[in-house]
Amino acid sequence: MKVRLYNLLIDIFLLIGVGIPLIFVGVLDTWRTILTMAIIVFTLIYVITHRLNISENNKFLYIYVFGVLGIVAYEIIKGSRSFNYSSYETFYALRQYLWIILAIPLYYIIIKYDNIDKFLNSIINIVLLSLGLRTFTWFCNNYLGISIFDNLLYEYGNLWGRNGNQRLDATSLIGILIPLLFYFYKKYKKKKYLYSMGFVFLYLVFVSQTRTLILGYAICIITMLFFEKRSSTKQLIFQLTIIFIFALAVNMGLVDFILNKLNISLNDGSIGFRQYEYAYYSSLLLNGKWMTGLGIITSLNSEGNRLLFGNLNTQMYLDDLGIFECFLQFGLFTIFLYGFLLIYIVYVTLKCNREKRYDFSFYLIGQFFYIAIVSIPLNLFGIQRIFSVSIIIAIVCAIHHNVIKKVKVK
């Protein structure tokens, strides 16, 4: 009974994380606060009521989670002193980073599954449900003139559009969905996963229109193909040919041509605006401030908001800066946030290969390259994507535990 309850609660967290409640009531900011409070209460109750088996503990899990919390605590104090945050402003600035603690109970819940794939498949179903609802909302608004699920449609406001059409985000878990779909397709050979991959690609091109995600999708799939366990020379040649064609297409400008034909121009004003943002925010990191960053900044605070506005009469968004957003606020601590996570994924991948768990290493390779590529222009620790970090950590740690457990049984 307890196991089912915990699974249900995790599913609810995932549903909130991908914006499903927005079709009923409330706005995004409210649900983010609800998610924060729910995760804190759930984690505390789970840890207090469970005797966490030492043999099931994962050192990386605790080092990373508490390391992140320590860094965030330091930067929130620094930001609070610099901008005179009120108690509410402090919570508002801190809110998204507290989601990381979900990784602890989630890890223990996942390893209780008879098969990790059951949990992974539930992620797929929930994210696809969200993308399906978003596609329906987008189509009704842009092509039928019918406004439906307004809170979902205007999740980021009515100015989040391109070429006259309202866009919808691909959710915070899109970075987990893409490698998972290909992992399930290669492992179970079911066409529904292949069709789902096609749907996700079309969503990124037409509904989300996020160039970085389109490129990240392509690179993720190609690298998973390339590093797949090779069983024949023909397969290796095929993989190398695909990579060669992709590289040639990029160098010859074919990708730019296709995106422009789809009205996703690479030559719009957003490029120049981002260049201004980089120059402006870089100028704030003088006199050694780059070492530990400026502290966590929130636009809710009047001083912080003035800093974010800069010298323009329009709002600038830290999320536009990609990984530099992380460096601006955390300085060299960014190396721990990104580096430790990516190194651990590589470590678990190599361990899976040694134990001939090629199914897990196949997924992990895709997850690694997606993070490494997409996080450069889209910060993994930004509020739009950080919810996925706790899920990724829990999955990778659970896979590691699964492999070690199998080795001990032998």
Image (tube, grey):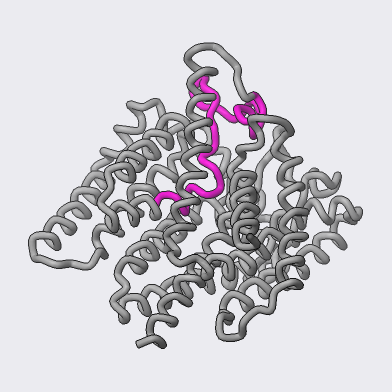
- The answer to which of 192 and 361 lies nearer the viewer is 192
278 left or right, relative to 66: left
- Whether residue 398 sits left or right of residue 88 in the image: it is left
Query: Which residue appears at 31% of the width and 81% of the height?
Result: 354
Q: Is residue 314 in view from this perspective?
A: yes
Which quadrant does the C terminus fall into? bottom left
Residue 205 image-quadrant placement: top left
Q: Position of residue 283 (x, y in %)?
A: 67, 55
In which quadrant of the rendered view does residue 407 lie? bottom left
Residue at coordinates 32% horizontally, 42% vertically from top-left?
192
Q: As drawn, is 86 to the left or to the right of 237?
A: right
- Choose top left, top right, bottom left or bottom right for residue 64: bottom right
Q: Is residue 195 magenta?
A: no
Total marks in image? 0
Residue 160, magenta (yes or no): yes
Report x, y in % for residue 212.
44, 45
Tell me: residue 128, above or below residue 87. above
Nearer-the-camera pick, 43 or 31: 43
Residue 89: x and y in percent read: 85, 51
What residue is drawn where x is 23% and y is 44%?
249
Residue ranking furthest to the left: 234
Vertically, is 57 above or below 145?
below
| Residue 26, above or below 335 | above
**Residue furthest to the top:** 145
Using the image as rendered, state which of residue 218 and residue 350 is in the foreground: 350
Q: Is residue 310 visible?
A: no
Magenta-tinted stretch: 150-178
Quadrant occupied by the N terminus: bottom right
